[in-house]
Amino acid sequence: MIIIKLLAIISVALTYILIVFGGYVASSESGMGCGPEWPLCNGEVIPVLENETLIEFAHRAIGLLLAIFVGILFVLIKRNKNNKILQTAGNCLISLLTLQILAGAVVVVLDLPTIVITVHLLVAMLFMLVLLWIYRTEASTRIKTKLSDNRKLKIVFQLNVLIILLLLTMGFGAFIKHEYYGLACDWLDCRETLLPVTAPEILQSGHRVLAIITAAYTIFLLFKAYLNNWGPGLKRRLLLAAAVVVIQILSGILTIITNISIPWAVVHLAIGTALFMIIADTRLIMGLMITKVTGETWKGDKGQPINKL
């Protein structure tokens, strides 16, 4: 259904905006702009909109708009009982939405606990992944390649590994940010020593190590794509991912150099989220192209033509 595809891509865009704006809320220390209350804001449905309250309330308003779109999307998916993949994706979507709403409420009521904030971000990333899953199921897009199903399965596994690395890197980043460990080390060393010594230094260095491993693995997959001729579609996507991961590392360095200035901190999160979207979207398309998973050659919903990248 065209309406499902449209709602899914709008919801993906809103989720991206919500994640990045959430980074701005955190960087500007506006997370308690509505006080320790949820769903009310300073005891009101619509509070006086100024300063931190305006920022936090805007974040909640975007979240409410997203929840409305997702609610409509879920109802439409449940009506489409012929597509089992779509039904599974819809169930995952509503479960993650419920978990995300509960996590958001706990974050406010318990005065911004770091662990819950980290979980809140990671659930949002998985939520976006499921929305992309729904969109790609309806869009019926394929990456132009002549690879066998066995080779596609191996590539899907490697992309899964990269997705996990990205989630770990972003989770670590969120944790050290909200524990105020972001400046425990300089961008190249740990202030007075080359290697980390204290717990904050070790945690921040752990985030950096994960970022380097993620970057190296992305470039490794790009190298394999060209060496083994994975096809022009995969080559282009992995080349884009490699370029974005390099930009992400540079933005991380600038974030440290500028003492975690709000603009660079937000840009760092925005680029990282975009990188996750590129990799997740590629993995989803490859997964939907495997005939062993679907049991038949994927022809799209109601046999419509398949778009090739």
Image: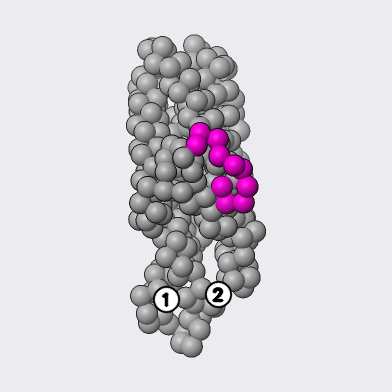
x and y percentages locating residue 51 in the rendered image: 62, 51
Q: Is residue 52 above or below residue 255?
A: above
Residue at 43% x, 82% y is 195
User: Helix or strand or loop: what does disc 2 sit on?
Assistant: loop
Residue on which the image places disc 2: 187
Residue 48 falls inside the magenta stretch? yes
Residue at far bottom of view: 192
Residue at 45% x, 23% y is 71
Instruction: Locate residue 307: give its quadrant.
Output: top right
User: Helix or strand or loop: what does disc 1 sit on?
Assistant: helix
Residue on which the image places disc 1: 201
Name which residue type carries label 2: Trp
Name which residue type carries label 1: Glu
Which one is nearer the viewer's eye here, 275 or 227? 275
Left or right: 130, with 66 as reference point: left
| Distance (Cα) linking label 2 and label 1 | 12 Å
x and y percentages locating residue 141 in the rendered image: 55, 27
Label 2: how many Cα within 10 Å (few below 14, some 14–19, many 20+): some
> What residue span does the magenta drawing correspond to?
44-53
